[in-house]
Image: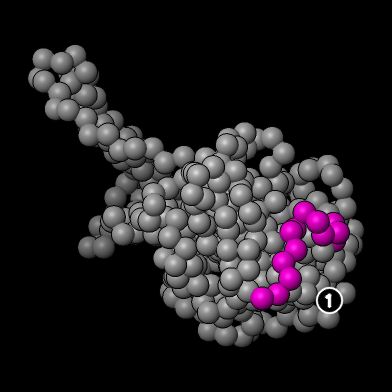
Amino acid sequence: MSRLVVNTGLADMRSLGTRADHSVFRVQRLIEQECNGRPCFVLAEPVVQENGAGIDWYVEIDDQITQLTSLSSDVADYHRRRLQLDIDRIREAADAYETRGGSSGRGHANTLRVATTFPGEGSIWIAGDISSPTAPIIITGWGYEAYKAERGISEITKYAALPRTETAVVQPAVPNDYPGEKTSVAMAWRWPLLGLLGLALLLASGFLLIPDCGLRMPGGSVLHGWRGENHCVAEAPKDIPIAIPRDVAKEPPKDVARDFAQTALKKTGITQNDGETTVTLVWSNMNDLDIQARCPDGTLVKINAPFCGAHVDYDDNGAGSGAYHLVKNPVEHLTWGSARLAKGKYTLYVEHYDNPASTTRNETDFTVILQQGAHYKQVKGRSKYSRKVEVATFDVP
């Protein structure tokens, strides 16, 4: 074993979760399951010192270990992004366990959240060659948070901070003479009454909207509206020609969304075909926006995380394009290609990930074009820094 940090004091840290949540073997096994066999961040093993004043952290690795805070800004930012991708995946897995319910699901969710919480960037270490894209990332101090987390804490730790979990409280039975019980009963009959009023309003509106010449029923009879059949207006003759302006008649209809997407993608070398399903994200500053897609099975497609047949094949102003190649008219492209999509609901998001060219966390207007075969849909929106915005959904029957 190689010693990472000696005598990490406990005076400024607060422990989270249960003792089982701090079992490095159990936590590492859960993390490896969520990383689908690919390299993920490594948790150092905590050993409480005999005097109880601190914790020593150990890891089985022979390479040189370098603290993230000692690296140059460019190299440190690169490894922050790598770690953020892992943390995103683990936190999403925790949310999925929470949704499943049950004591086991809730236990796994809390364990994963504990594992992705640490006091600050001083707890992040890089093993071996710091310039390697596969250099192991090691976390110490996991399972703890700083007492004063709002001061000097890194952005990545803010995101990974464990949310407060409220303890469930079983309320005692309410006696019948309790005033609050009468209020609940009084509210109970209001909802059916409001439902009946809404249904009556809907029927009255439908009766008023019946056409003058009536509505033919399945049996052949005609249902007339409130003015009766005497007010039926004769239909206009069918042989009256309709004048079409000459210039409009000659021009084929334009697909604005298709033209916009293809114009934006010219610089990328990507050509869209009518047999594909794609998403194009376009904006007009040097911020880093990302397009993401939630698959029917709950997995999230994003940079370096292909799922359900989709992947991001072009990304400006982010790690996906190399060493932060910044442009003023960026494009990001996510595609399923010509693959057949799985059945179910898909949700598209835009995440305002970073402002690499500025410290000003300004909002950014964007345009998303969803291509489904020969059909194109354009959606406009605005993103805020470190926020994820839902922009569209579609179903595959």
Is 290 inside the magenta-drawn segment?
no
Whether residue 9 sits left or right of residue 73 in the image: it is left
Q: Residue at x 55, y 46 (%)?
A: 54
**Element on which disc 1 rests:** helix
Identified by mark 1, the residue type is: Thr
The image shows residue 355 at horizontal and vertical percentages of 80, 51
Name the residue rendered at 15%, 16% in the picture.
178
Q: Nearer the viewer, residue 101 or 16?
A: 16
Count up the numbered dots.
1
Residue at image x 78%, y 80%?
270
Note whether residue 104 is visible: yes
Pick the residue in front: 266 or 330.
330
Along the line of sight, which residue is nearer the eye, 373 or 388?
388
Instruction: Tell whether position 63 is magenta.
Output: yes
Q: Which residue is mark 1?
A: 268
Instruction: Quadrant for the C terminus, please.
Output: bottom left
Residue 209: where, in percent of width, then height? 41, 43
Q: Is residue 270 above or below residue 231?
A: below
Residue 197 placement (x, y as % from top left) = 28, 31
Q: Quadrant of the N terminus?
A: bottom right
| Residue projecting furthest to the front | 51
Question: Label 1 neighbourhood size at 10 Å, few (<14), some (14-19), many (20+)?
Answer: some
Q: Is residue 290 at all visible to an observer of this figure?
A: no
Residue 4 in the image, given as x and y percentages of width and height: 65, 61
Q: Residue at x 57, y 55 (%)?
A: 56
Give left or right: position of 84 versus 167. right
Q: Which residues are magenta?
A: 62-74
Colour mapping: one colour
